[in-house]
Image (spheres, grey):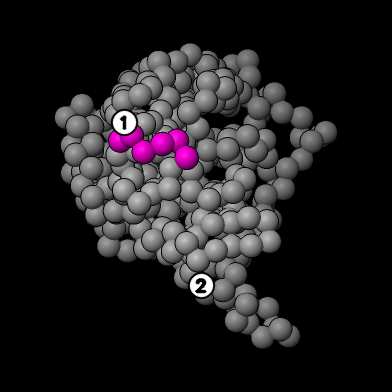
Amino acid sequence: MPQHRVAVIQAGTTLFDTPHTLERMAALCEEARHNNVELAVFPEAYIGGYPKGLDFGARVGTRNEAGRDDYLRYWKAAIEVPGPECRTIGSFAAKMKAHLVTGIIERDGGSLYCAVLFFAPDGSLLGKRRKLMPTASERLIWGQGDGSTLPVFNTDIGKIGAAICWENYLPPLRQTYYNKGINIWCAPTVDEREIWQTSMRHIAYEGRTFVLSACQYLTRADAPEDYTCPQGNDPKTTLIRGGSVIIDPMGTCLTEPVYDREAVIWADIDTDQAIRGKYDLDVAGHYARPDVFSLTVNETPFHPRKAACSPASEPASPTPDQAPHPDTAL
């Protein structure tokens, strides 16, 4: 029975101050190291921040200059991949000698993407994935990812993948991961609602996978003084209250949801439990009906800026490391 210690990190960003957020991340990783974790999962948008409550000066049909200033400040807090901040985060993984998964805001040209980075215990960047579908007003500030960043990494502790916040409500995405054999499902989020707990338990049970949901715990004190905050300006006001949890493949909470505080939450898992669970429910195997249902996933990279610069009469030519893959039927 292979036992592995995994952790979800419940903490908030120092909004618009990435260097200070990295300092906080270092301290949290040190706490995780002292607990001998082999995988640490940080929340959605932990590096770069989740600007809860900001409207970026937008109304239907109009934007204002104050909103453009907010976007510029947010853009400056985001990071490039690869980049110096990636190397810093990789050093945290190397010091822990553990896998590290974290939500970030990725800067690519003038656009921003909500993304997740995966680091190996030696500190190397295994890969990333971009959120496919930002939710509601997130679409104002974040671009959409494509199918080329849907990795499931086969590691020494299990098959690790990630779905970001409300992506977890996309049935085709869930089935894609089930088909890839995921057994450690990372769910970085800022969803603090009670129903989120039900969703996480459902995914664990449906996919017979461990679910590690890491949510931010963010207060007004984590934002600058000039931050427009509908929730109020008392530094103790909670903007995101957490709810991080670890769930086993039968939908049982190994740790109860934690609210209203920063925390490093860990549990020991046995990935053989995923196989035991698939005895009676394997939605990518004996419980599937491929003769009735089919799923096609387009994992071809799409690069808007490169496509826009290509001659209209010729398709954009991919570089060797961006060669398109045929649609993958799952």
x and y percentages locating residue 315 in the rendered image? 68, 78
Residue located beneath label 2 in the image = 320
The label number, if any, that marks residue 236 in the structure image: 1
Residue 129 seen: no
* Nearer to us in this view, 108 or 74: 74
x and y percentages locating residue 48 in the rendered image? 37, 52
| Separation of residues labelled 1 and 2 (CA atoms) | 51 Å
Q: Residue at x 35, y 24 (%)?
A: 260
The label number, if any, that marks residue 114 in the structure image: none
Q: Residue at x 70, y 23 (%)?
A: 287
Q: Residues within 10 Å of mark 2 (few under 14, many from 20)?
A: few
Residue 303 in the magenta stretch? The answer is: no
- Decide: is 110 above or below 250: below
Mark 1 or mark 2, earlier in chain: 1
x and y percentages locating residue 116 in the rendered image? 44, 48
Query: Where is the N terminus found, in terms of image quarters?
Result: top left
Instruction: Tell me which amino acid carries mark 2.
Output: Pro
Q: Quadrant of residue 175?
A: top right
Q: Residue at x 57, y 22 (%)?
A: 195
- The boundaries of the magenta stretch are 230-235
